[in-house]
Image (spheres, rainbow, N blue to C red):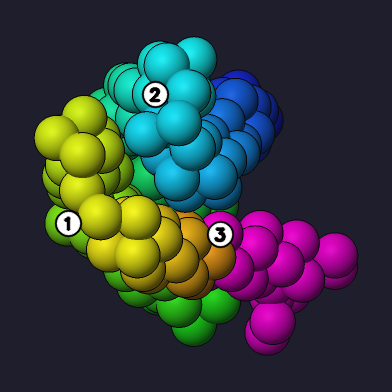
């Protein structure tokens, strides 16, 4: 059972978090161009929908991660607790800053917001996305290295 839970957790991580990371990273570029190009506006809207849709499905990642941790008996290990905290921070950044920021930028880009304002908002969103991606990179390293783990990895 542990192998099945771990497999689902890893697959969900790759297939859900990966697209969010890519779509969120591309969004600022396309939203900046949205005022000049209708195709870029469509691309920005699609990237936002990808982020939002995959964020909902992304709940599977911590659910299967916690189930795997429980099966392995490592829920109190510091590497897992740290991963849970970092995952929670990444989820909060996505839900409370990135997705609403994308939504606001899509609305204002269609309303003809000043280029400087759009550029600053896109840069802020790109920075938040970088932090989101960095948090996930640290979680992946923690999952592989597992400091203090006695599993022999």
Assess disc 1: are there few (<14), some (14-19) or many (≥20) residues with their C-alpha within 10 Å of its C-alpha: few
Give the mark nearest the N terminus, 3 or 1. Answer: 1
On residue 96, which mark appears? Answer: 1
**Image coordinates for residue 45, horizontal then vertical, percent:** 34, 23
Q: Secondary structure at mark 2?
A: helix
Residue that numbered label 2 is attached to: 41
Image quadrant in which the C terminus is located: bottom right
Q: Residues within 10 Å of mark 2 (few under 14, many from 20)?
A: many
Query: Depth check: 49 or 56 in front?
Result: 49
Q: Quadrant of the N terminus?
A: top right
Nearer-the-camera pick, 17 or 105? 105
Question: Which of the two residues, 75 or 136, is positioned nearer the viewer here?
Answer: 136
The residue labelled by disc 3 is 133
Q: Residues within 10 Å of mark 3 (few under 14, many from 20)?
A: many
| Earlier residue among tags 3 and 2 | 2
Q: Residue at x 35, y 55 (%)?
A: 115
Residue 103 painted magenta = no
Q: Nearer the viewer, residue 45 or 69?
A: 45
The residue range painted magenta reads: 132-153
Q: Can you tell which of label 2 and label 1 is closer to the viewer?
A: 2
- Residue 5 visible (yes or no): no
């Amino acid at each position: 059972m542990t192998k099945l839970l771990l497999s689902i957790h890893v697959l969900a991580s790759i297939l859900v978090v990966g697209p969010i990371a890519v779509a969120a990273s591309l969004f600022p570029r396309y939203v900046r161009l949205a005022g000049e190009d209708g195709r870029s506006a469509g691309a920005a809207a699609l990237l936002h929908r990808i982020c939002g849709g995959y964020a909902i499905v992304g709940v599977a990642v911590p659910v299967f991660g916690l189930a795997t941790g429980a099966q392995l008996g490592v829920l109190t290990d510091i590497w897992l607790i740290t991963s849970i905290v970092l995952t929670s921070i990444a989820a909060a950044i996505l839900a409370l800053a990135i997705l609403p920021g994308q939504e606001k930028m899509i609305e204002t880009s269609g309303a003809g917001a000043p280029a400087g304002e759009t550029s600053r908002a896109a840069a802020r969103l790109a920075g938040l996305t970088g932090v989101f991606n960095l948090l996930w990179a640290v979680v992946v390293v923690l999952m592989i290295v597992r400091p203090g783990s006695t599993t022999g990895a």
